[in-house]
Image (spheres, helix red, strand yellow):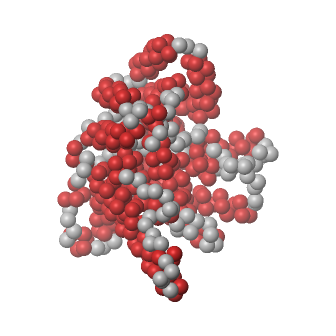
Amino acid sequence: MNFITVPFVVFFLCVLGGCRLLRNSPALFRLFLPAAGLVFYAAGGLYALPLLPLEAAVAWGAGRLAGYGLPLERSAAVRPTEQGSRRALSEAGRRWAAGIGIALSLSPLALLKYYEFFLSCLYDLGLGRLAAVMPADIADWTLPAGLSFYSFQAVAYIVDRYRNPGESPASYTDLLGYLAFFPTVMAGPILRPGDFLSQAARAPARAVDVTGSTALILSGLFKKAVLASFLSEHAVRDVFALPEAYSSGAVLLATYAYALQIYCDFSGYTDLATGIAGFMGFTLPRNFDAPYMSCNIREFWRRWHITLSSWLRDYLYIPLGGNRKGPARHCVNLLLTMALGGLWHGAHLRFIVWGLLHGGALVLLLLWRKIFPVADDGDGRGAAPESPALGRLCARLATFHFVCAAWVFFRAEDMPAALSMLERIILWNEPGDALPFTVPAAVAAGLCIQWAGPSIHAAFLRLQGALCLPLQALSAALLAELILRMGPDGVFPFIYFSF
């Protein structure tokens, strides 16, 4: 169910009515939450509905075992030598429970998203006989929407239970509500279990920031329905489908257009999800922070898809050893983390290449800073504050163009198409069709949002805050209607629904 549809508006109004009725009944609200999520998810297809309760059951059972430790060391009847061995056995049991739970949680994702890719790799490696005896019909199964997101959330719950066995485990219904939370179940942001579950306990009684939530919804509508849809329809779709028909300048402009399209599309979804959750009393984590204003690739990943990059850091990069096992292992861990992050987006070689490009850039930045140490600005974001303005501008331009070049592999249909686009840009002066003059204006508008977005948001809050509630509702409705009329006919699917 797409957020920008009439059926969703009706569904959301019903959910808000339920939240209002249950504001004094936290226990009933915590039952209502997973029910609403399952209804929303079922609207996308009943075939995938059983997976959510099953994922929740696996995470709940594995989390219970992974967070369970026998307090034998406190028993006077157990000799000291036995205490150590039994603690080791208990720790090993918890570790096995967590490992099995993680494997089971990720197995639907592995089968439905990567099975066909695995078979093609076997053929490429000359193992066609082995691939021939494996079932082929699995590759034809449809990938359920949101599977990559709620699978990662299930893993986060299991790992957090293993790391913090002293904390109280969640009930099954609370855990199902966490995985099936309808604003985020389709495309994130990726929620942390402790943060969400603590909010679910007090959400019905929380005061709703109506103005702030409305501003986020309008922001998401504009980014998605106007900018992202326009760039897709008038530049990205046609050029990436047949780059040979377009001039070098048009291909370069389409590359910029896709960088802004994917930002406006995904950050627009995040704004919508955050605003919708805000009306229900929830605060979602920030997922974007003007990523194209970054001065280096490390800063970019602190600003782009923040919940995924922090998940990869906490549940993959650090368990691999992070930067604790020497410079060589540090570089390998960066490359492996980013390659797997690329593979998470899709079962294609081009996604792995995209991840390795970012991983390689992170490694080069690491080596550069080993040779030429640079003071940080306090939050890990790039150049030191005393760096000249021209230097920061050059760093931003270099980072932006590297990210745009890597996006070509992310968006192209296959590797030859990606290389063809890059070749036309590098050779330059290649003849072909041009793009409409409105495309550069839309690209510029997307970049301006990076720079002026916070100021626009603050100005809207001030203006809306000066109005009474009925006038706020009327002005928001008029703005929403204007935004939808500015966009093309029909509702384009969100890009990250396919991941």
Q: Position of residue 382 (x, y in %)?
A: 69, 49
Residue extending farthest to the front is 76
Q: Is residue 327 left or right of residue 230?
A: right
Q: Position of residue 296 (x, y in %)?
A: 64, 50
At 58% across and 23% down in the image, what residue appears? Answer: 461
At 65% across and 58% down in the image, what residue appears? Answer: 365
Q: Is residue 119 left or right of residue 457?
A: left
Asked if residue 216 shows in the view, the reply is no
Q: Is residue 317 left or right of residue 58?
A: right
Is residue 362 depicted above or below 455 in this figure? below
Asked if residue 22 shows in the view, the reply is yes
Q: Nearer the viewer, residue 231 or 202?
A: 202
Is residue 422 depicted above or below 465 in this figure? below
Q: Position of residue 71 (x, y in %)?
A: 47, 72
Is residue 486 depicted above or below 131 in this figure? above
Q: Total of numbered circles in the picture?
A: 0
Q: Position of residue 489 (x, y in %)?
A: 34, 24
At 29% across and 68% down in the image, what residue appears? Answer: 123
Is residue 340 depicted above or below 253 in this figure? below
Q: Nearer the viewer, residue 397 or 425?
A: 397
Quadrant (top left/top right/bottom left/bottom right) for the N terminus: top left
At 50% across and 54% down in the image, what residue appears? Answer: 311
